[in-house]
Every structure is written in structure tokens, then in C-alpha cells.
């Protein structure tokens, strides 16, 4: 088999030419992941679907997915080369996370042949954007404590409950949903995963406005939603088997070999105005203190990139512990927060108020600072990452818990839970 | 550290690790606390035979790496130096040896041969640096007929009292110059300084109208800026790898302590407040490994990002190495600030390494200059 695979360097040259001919320069909405208003967002969504279709037609979609599901059957090294060549170009950013990782990755590992045949090619063609339905109003980090419940009804299941923090659910197509199917066993043993079309009777989707005014995140309310058993993934009550891999693919997120997105250290702007641009606007380029902040930001960018490379290399060589991805998660969360603080410091008092015209170029440092902790909360908090690192990487004793070996219905819950 | 080493690299690393373990255990370093040199000449000469001074030098000049990537090989040695808190002017001898590699002059070739053989120590006197304005340089180098004249003071200079050769960097009209000076030359005063480390010795070097033939110049007068930048990259790679070795030692020691030490009937390792601190330290440690390795590779391969990778490593590890070591002290409690405990050897090492060849702030300014220039060009 491996003799048939195109060499990474040949592939890289082919990818470089194709990208140059087919993909324009990177756009603000590739980086922001959400637009000023819903009309613009839906335009960006349509464009991302078209870009994903372009990748598919060009033979560059799903590089690490098997050919039988429309992928290219290549290796993580090919995906990495493609992502490096993509630096500075537009790309279908709304497909990266969570559609490809964790959702498509989990589908590939645990989906039935029918589920894979139905959904993976559709994802690769840009027809299906997926969301993950994990968190609930009663608990964020304690994912296995889900109380959204599915009850068997003939060949179907009936779903009731609520999921929250689901980005893009208001326009996305399908969701991967973790639900409780058995209350008489300990919490990890009574969960099942379902595939769920988002826009159907019984699902009500509310937008959640965040403090910066955007409202990408949603909450879904399920009232007697009917799910055919053929849309169940994995065995009944074995949802946590799927769930642990799901968490893994969520933690590696943008670094997953299934995700297409530009990477590299070209020195080009990563997101928004660069520290240099912010300092220039504040008239501080000659200020040694500002220069130190600019240099710190650049050093942090390089270190973040190299840490990802190191952990990916360890994982690929088989020497890495899969829980090492928590190190990357913790580091990225802290580094991002520091980058936002640096930008805020460089902006000085200009971050307090801005004109309409300044919004795109240099206006956002104050608001980005207010939203800073998102990088340490979303996708599993940094506190949970610290637990994973200390317990599963360093081998320290586990935290005591009130729900181990207890039937889930007897687990203590706060007044607002369940 | 590296995930994939060649068998030759493993041999190089393991031989040095064994030698350091035998020759300079911490018990020995404690005894040598007041030794004026901090190490024995025979120790250094044997180290030179193991390759400590030759890895950045071209084969035709008597050096040679084991993998074709000298900076990577040298980083393996430096890591072991950090892990053992080993004495000896590893940074300076390699920085000077690399600077002399490829030089044609007789005096440069003679000095290089002595450094490679471990017979002479060389110290680098950085009297001008790229993060300084020209008027901030502490040494000037000017032409006078067929001679060059050097004036100024540099501190701290490692092992200057033991050195046979000084590579002096100073400011000339139009750029930096470098001169190789015999340490015993008239007009040079070397005064020992008290310092942070138990094992390494520093001095201040004053050059008062020191006159040497212009043939002692390394490179051309007022044209050494690029060479100095390259030397700083080499130094950053060595210091970064050494600090990572010391961080690993301090972290492992503290991890063991957390499992062994019981308080209120529980191991320290069972307290979430402490577990989270270990998780943070682990993330700094892994990040330091990653950027140290990346800097060594980039410098070895002379990639476009070599300068930035080296400065990023020096800046990041210079900040987080001492933070990690101080956290290790905190987690040990009172025993952590005693001379009796081993931890301080590693705290000293990372703290000193932070200060040599550019502080984190200075390397950040270098990074900023590159970034500003890049964005102005774009």
C-alpha cells in the first residue's frame, strides 16, 4: 500500500500549484470565525461551503480519510504539508473545527458503514457542517454527567433535554449528541451517542449573546425529538467509549490530521492587527517597553508552534501519551490570553473607544481583552487540562468524586441540575 | 529530548553524561565551591576529547559534528551540562571556536587548535551587542597604523582568569569589530567577580589601550555585525539546551518529592492546588524543550528563522526556566533554600543562563526589530 502513496514533497509541489491557482488570499472572516451580522455570516458560510467543494473537486479534501468515503487515503504528513502551503490563503474555516475534528474523526472511528457512507462524503463536499452537543446547562466540564435523555420507543428513540454552547447551531446541519440512556448504572456506563439533524420538529435553537455582542453560540431545547435507531453511533450505553475518543479529537482540535487550515510561521498576521500595527497606531514603535512586548508576542507565537510540532511528532512516533494533548491545550489557552493582554497593553488608552472605521484595523483590543478567558474555557477548561496533565501524564492521584460506582440517578446534583 | 537521535548522537550524549556523572557529581561541586577555577584542567581536556569544543568547527579546521548538524549535537552536550550542573566554559569555548573556524590568520589557527585540544580556554568579551545603540557599547576598537587599539571594560566574562585567549567585541566607526587577544597582553586587567553559580567563575575584563597587530582581527574591521549575530545564535542554542537540562533535573526532583512527602496524612501529589502547579510547570518544560530543539535545528540548518528561533528560545526559557525553578523551591518549602539540598544548583544554572548573551528583554527587542522590518517590507 505505502508504495502507492505519493511522496510528501511531490504532493507539496502539486498542492502549492493548485492552491495558488484556486484559493485567493486569506480573508478577515477566515480568522474571526464570525461576521458582524447574520447576513454577512451566511454569505461567509456559503463561501466556505463552496471552498470545501472546490477542495473536493480538486482532489484535496479529506486527505487523511479513506478513499472509499471520498477521501485521499494520504498521511498526516501530507495534511501538514498541505496546511503549510495554505499559509496566507483563504480556506473553508467553518469546516475545520468541529466538523472535521472531532465530528468527522469520530464518525470515521465509530460510525456504521452506512453512516460513514452517508455523511463523510457529504462533509467532504461541503454539504454538511456539524456541531457537537456535549455541554449542558447543568454542567460544562463534567461531560459524562449529561442529563439530556433518550428513551427507546420501538425502532426509534425519543430525546428530551437541552445542550448549550453549541457554536453555529443556528445555521449548521447535523450534530453529534451525547445523551443518557440508562440512569441505573454509574454515569459513564449509561450514555449513548446519536447523530441528529439540527433543523427538525422538536428542536428549538436559541442564540446566546456574549459580552462582546456576538451570538454564535446557541442553546438547543429538545422536546420529544424522534431519532431512528439507525442514527445511533456505537452500542447502546457504550457512549463513553465513543466519548473518550471524541474528547481526544476535541482536544487536538485544529492540530488534528483531519483538519485543513493554514499553518506556519511566515510572520504574517495571524489574526487581526499585528502587535507591530497596534504599537505603530499608538505611536509606540520606538518605545523599548513596546518593543519588548512585540518581541514577547513573537516569541510566544514561535514557542506555541514548536510545542504543537513536538507533541504531534511524539504522537506520530507512538512515544507520546494521548493525554499529552492536554499540555498543548493548557499552553495554547494561556498563550492566547497573554497575546490578547499584550495587544491590549500595546494599544494603551486607544483600546477604550474607537470609531466605526477603526473597528477592523485596530479597534478590537479592548473587546478582545474582555473576551480573553474564552481561550481558557472553550473546548474544555484549562483547569480540566491541568487535572489531565497531573493525573494522566504525571501519574498523580485522582481527585475524589461523588459519582464513581454510584447509579447515576443517585448522584448528588445541585438544585439547578437535571 | 529529540525524539529521533542517530546512534552516534546517542553515543555522544551518553558518553558525556557518564563522564559528568563520574567526574563532577554534585558532592564534588560542593567541595569546589571556593576553587578559583571551579574545574580541573584535566577535566576540560578530556571533555575536549569527547567533542565538547569541536562540534561547531568545520572538519577542515580540525572540528566536526557527529550528525552533520553541529548545533544539534552540541545542544545534546549542553543539555547534559544543565542536567548535571556541570562546570566549564562550554558556551564561551564553542562560541569562540566557531568564530575562529574558517579564519586564515596564523594566530587564529593556533588559538583554534588549542581550544579544540582543550589545552586553552577562550572567553568571549562582548563589549558591544546588537540590542545596544552604538553609544552604549562598552568597548571601542580602532585602527592605529598596522595595529588595532582596544579600550573598555566587559563584565561578566566567564572563566576569564583561566582563559588563554579573549575574543573581544567592540564598536568601531561604522560597525562592530572583533579581535582575538592573548589574555596576558599588556594593558589587560582581569578582576574576579563574586557570582551566582557554585561552579562557574566570572570576571570583569578591562582593556586599557591594548594594542595588537591588525592580523589579530577576526573578520574585517567594523564588519563583524553578522558574525556577532551568528555567535549569539550559537550561544542561545547552548544556553537554552543547558537550561532545559537544569529544568528537567529540578522538575524531576520536585516531582519525586511530591510523591514521597506526606502532610496531613496525604502525599503532596494528591492536593489539587499543587497538582495544578505541576501541570503548569510541565507545560513550561515541554514548551522549553520544543523551542530549544527548534532553535538548535534552525541554527544548524541556517534557516530563515534561525535568528528568531534562537532569540525566542533565549527569551522564553530565560523567563520560564527561573520561574519553574522558583516554583520547585516553593514546592519544597524551607529545605528548598538550603545549601544542603541539591535544588539550588539548578536554580543557579537557569538564573545565570537567563542573564548571559542577552537577557529575555534584549532578545525580545531583537525579535521586535525583525518583526518591524518584516512588516515594513510587506
Image: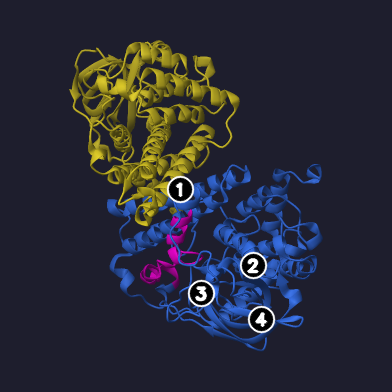
Q: Earlier in the sequence, mark 3 or mark 1?
A: 1
Residue at figure coordinates x 36%, y 15% from the top left: B215
Q: Secondary structure at mark 3?
A: helix
**Mark 2 to mark 4: distance in Å?**
14 Å
The answer to whether marks 2 and 1 mark residues whose Cβ atoms lie closer than 8 Å is no
Q: Compare marks 2 and 3 and give the one earlier in the sequence.
A: 2
Q: Is residue A287 visible?
A: no
Q: Dots 1 and 4: beta carbons under 8 Å?
A: no
Q: Report how far apart the C-alphas of labels 2 and 3 lie in the structure.
A: 20 Å
- Report the side of B366 relative to A239 (left or right): left
Please name the residue that numbered disc 3 is placed on: A410
Instruction: Return the mark for residue A151.
Output: 4
Q: Mark 4 Cα within 10 Å, few/some/many (few <14, many 20+)?
A: some
Q: Which chain is yellow?
A: B
| Above or below, A263 relative to A414 | above
- Give the spatial CA distance, label 3 vs label 4: 19 Å
According to the image, label 2 marks what residue?
A239
Is residue A72 visible in the rendered image? The answer is yes
Residue A352, position as x, y percentages in the image: 31, 73
Discs 3, 1: same chain: yes
Magenta residues, start to end: A360-388
Q: Nearer the viewer, mark 3 or mark 1?
A: 3
- Sequence-wise first label, 2 or 1: 2
The numbered mark, 1 or 4, whose residue comes first in the sequence reads: 4
Return the residue nearer the eye: B158 or A315: A315
Residue B378 left/right relative to A106: left
What is the x, y in percent for residue B60?
A: 53, 15
Alpha-carbon neighbours of circle 3 within 10 Å: few (<14), some, or many (≥20)?
A: few
Location of residue B187 in the rendering, given as x and y in whole percent from the top left corner: 19, 16
Q: Chain of mark 3?
A: A
Tell me the tag on residue A287.
none
**Dot placed on the residue nearer the N-terminal end, 3 or 4:** 4
Amino acid at each position: 500500500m505505502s508504495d502507492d502513496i505519493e511522496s510528501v514533497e511531490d504532493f507539496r509541489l502539486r498542492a502549492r500549484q493548485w492552491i495558488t491557482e484556486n484559493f485567493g488570499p486569506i480573508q478577515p472572516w477566515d480568522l474571526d470565525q464570525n461576521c458582524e451580522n447574520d447576513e454577512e455570516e451566511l454569505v461567509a458560510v456559503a463561501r466556505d461551503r463552496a471552498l470545501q467543494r472546490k477542495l473536493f473537486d480538486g482532489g484535496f479534501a479529506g486527505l487523511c480519510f479513506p478513499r472509499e468515503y471520498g477521501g485521499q487515503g494520504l498521511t498526516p504528513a501530507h495534511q501538514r504539508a498541505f496546511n503549510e502551503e495554505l499559509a496566507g490563503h483563504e480556506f473553508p474555516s467553518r469546516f475545520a473545527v468541529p466538523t472535521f475534528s472531532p465530528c468527522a474523526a469520530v464518525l470515521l472511528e465509530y460510525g456504521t458503514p452506512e453512516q460513514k457512507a452517508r455523511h463523510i462524503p457529504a462533509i467532504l463536499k461541503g454539504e454538511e457542517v456539524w456541531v457537537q452537543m456535549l455541554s449542558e446547562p447543568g454542567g460544562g466540564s463534567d461531560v459524562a454527567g449529561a442529563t439530556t435523555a433518550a428513551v427507546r420507543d420501538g425502532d426509534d428513540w425519543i430525546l428530551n433535554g437541552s445542550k448549550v454552547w453549541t457554536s453555529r447551531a443556528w445555521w449548521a446541519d447535523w450534530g453529534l449528541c451525547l445523551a443518557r440512556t440508562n440512569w441505573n448504572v454509574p454515569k459513564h456506563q449509561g450514555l449513548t451517542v446519536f447523530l441528529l439533524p439540527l433543523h427538525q420538529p422538536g428542536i428549538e435553537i436559541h442564540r446566546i449573546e456574549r459580552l462582546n455582542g456576538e451570538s454564535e453560540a446557541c442553546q438547543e431545547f429538545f422536546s420529544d425529538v424522534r431519532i431512528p435507531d439507525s442514527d445511533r453511533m456505537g452500542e447502546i450505553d457504550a457512549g463513553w467509549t465513543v466519548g473518550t475518543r471524541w474528547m481526544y479529537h476535541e482536544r487536538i482540535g485544529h492540530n488534528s490530521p483531519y483538519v485543513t487550515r493554514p499553518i506556519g510561521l511566515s510572520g504574517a498576521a495571524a489574526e487581526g492587527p499585528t502587535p507591530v500595527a497596534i504599537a505603530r497606531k499608538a505611536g509606540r514603535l520606538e518605545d523599548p517597553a513596546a518593543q519588548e512586548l512585540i518581541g514577547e508576542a513573537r516569541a510566544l507565537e514561535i514557542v506555541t508552534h514548536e510545542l504543537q510540532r513536538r507533541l504531534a511528532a511524539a504522537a506520530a512516533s507512538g512515544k507520546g501519551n494521548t493525554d499529552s494533548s492536554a499540555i498543548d491545550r493548557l499552553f495554547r489557552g494561556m498563550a492566547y490570553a497573554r497575546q490578547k493582554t499584550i495587544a491590549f497593553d500595546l494599544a494603551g488608552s486607544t483600546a477604550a473607544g474607537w470609531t466605526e472605521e477603526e473597528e477592523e484595523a485596530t479597534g478590537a483590543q479592548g473587546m478582545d481583552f474582555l473576551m480573553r478567558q474564552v481561550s481558557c474555557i472553550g473546548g474544555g477548561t484549562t483547569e480540566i487540562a491541568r487535572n489531565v496533565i497531573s493525573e494522566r501524564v504525571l501519574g498523580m492521584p485522582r481527585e475524589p468524586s461523588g459519582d464513581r460506582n454510584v447509579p447515576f440517578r443517585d448522584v448528588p446534583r445541585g438544585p439547578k441540575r437535571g | 529530548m529529540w525524539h529521533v537521535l542517530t546512534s552516534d548522537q546517542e553515543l555522544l550524549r551518553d558518553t558525556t553524561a557518564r563522564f559528568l556523572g563520574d567526574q563532577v557529581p554534585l558532592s564534588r561541586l560542593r567541595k569546589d565551591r571556593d576553587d578559583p577555577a571551579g574545574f580541573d584542567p584535566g577535566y576540560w581536556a578530556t571533555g575536549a576529547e569527547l567533542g565538547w569544543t569541536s562540534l561547531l568547527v568545520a572538519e577542515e579546521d580540525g572540528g566536526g559534528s557527529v550528525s552533520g548538524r553541529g548545533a544539534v549535537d552540541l545542544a545534546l552536550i549542553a543539555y547534559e551540562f544543565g542536567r548535571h550542573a556541570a562546570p566549564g566554559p562550554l558556551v564561551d569555548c564553542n562560541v569562540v571556536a566557531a568564530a575562529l573556524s574558517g579564519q586564515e590568520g596564523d594566530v587564529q589557527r593556533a588559538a583554534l587548535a588549542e581550544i579544540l585540544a582543550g589545552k586553552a580556554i577562550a572567553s568571549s568579551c562582548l563589549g558591544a551587542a546588537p540590542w545596544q545603540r552604538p553609544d552604549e557599547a562598552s568597548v571601542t576598537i580602532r585602527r592605529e597604523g598596522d595595529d588595532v587599539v582596544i579600550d573598555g571594560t566587559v563584565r561578566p566574562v566567564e572563566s576569564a582568569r583561566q582563559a588563554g585567549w579573549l575574543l573581544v567585541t567592540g564598536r568601531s566607526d561604522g560597525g562592530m569589530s572583533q579581535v582575538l587577544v592573548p589574555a596576558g597582553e599588556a594593558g589587560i586587567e582581569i578582576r574576579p567577580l563574586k557570582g551566582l553559580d557554585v561552579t562557574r567563575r566570572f570576571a570583569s575584563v578591562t582593556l586599557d589601550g591594548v594594542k595588537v597587530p591588525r592580523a589579530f582581527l577576526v573578520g574585517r574591521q567594523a564588519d563583524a555585525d553578522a558574525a556577532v549575530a551568528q555567535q549569539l545564535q550559537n550561544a542561545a542554542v547552548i544556553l537554552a539546551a543547558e537550561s532545559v537540562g537544569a529544568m528537567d533535573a529540578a522538575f524531576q526532583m520536585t516531582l519525586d518529592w511530591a510523591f514521597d512527602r506526606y502532610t496531613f496524612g496525604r502525599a503532596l501529589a494528591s492536593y489539587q492546588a499543587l497538582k495544578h502547579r505541576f501541570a503548569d510547570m510541565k507545560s513550561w518544560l515541554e514548551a522549553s524543550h520544543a523551542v530549544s530543539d527548534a532553535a538548535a535545528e534552525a541554527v544548524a540548518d541556517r534557516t530563515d528563522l534561525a535568528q528568531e528561533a534562537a532569540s525566542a528560545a533565549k527569551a522564553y526559557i530565560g523567563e520560564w526556566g527561573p520561574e519553574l525553578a522558583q516554583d520547585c523551591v516553593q514546592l519544597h518549602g524551607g529545605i528548598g533554600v538550603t545549601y544542603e539540598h541539591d535544588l539550588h544548583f539548578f536554580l543557579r544554572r537557569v538564573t545565570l543562563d537567563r542573564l548571559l548573551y542577552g537577557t529575555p528583554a534584549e532578545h525580545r527587542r531583537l525579535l521586535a526589530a525583525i518583526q518591524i522590518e518584516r512588516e515594513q517590507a510587506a
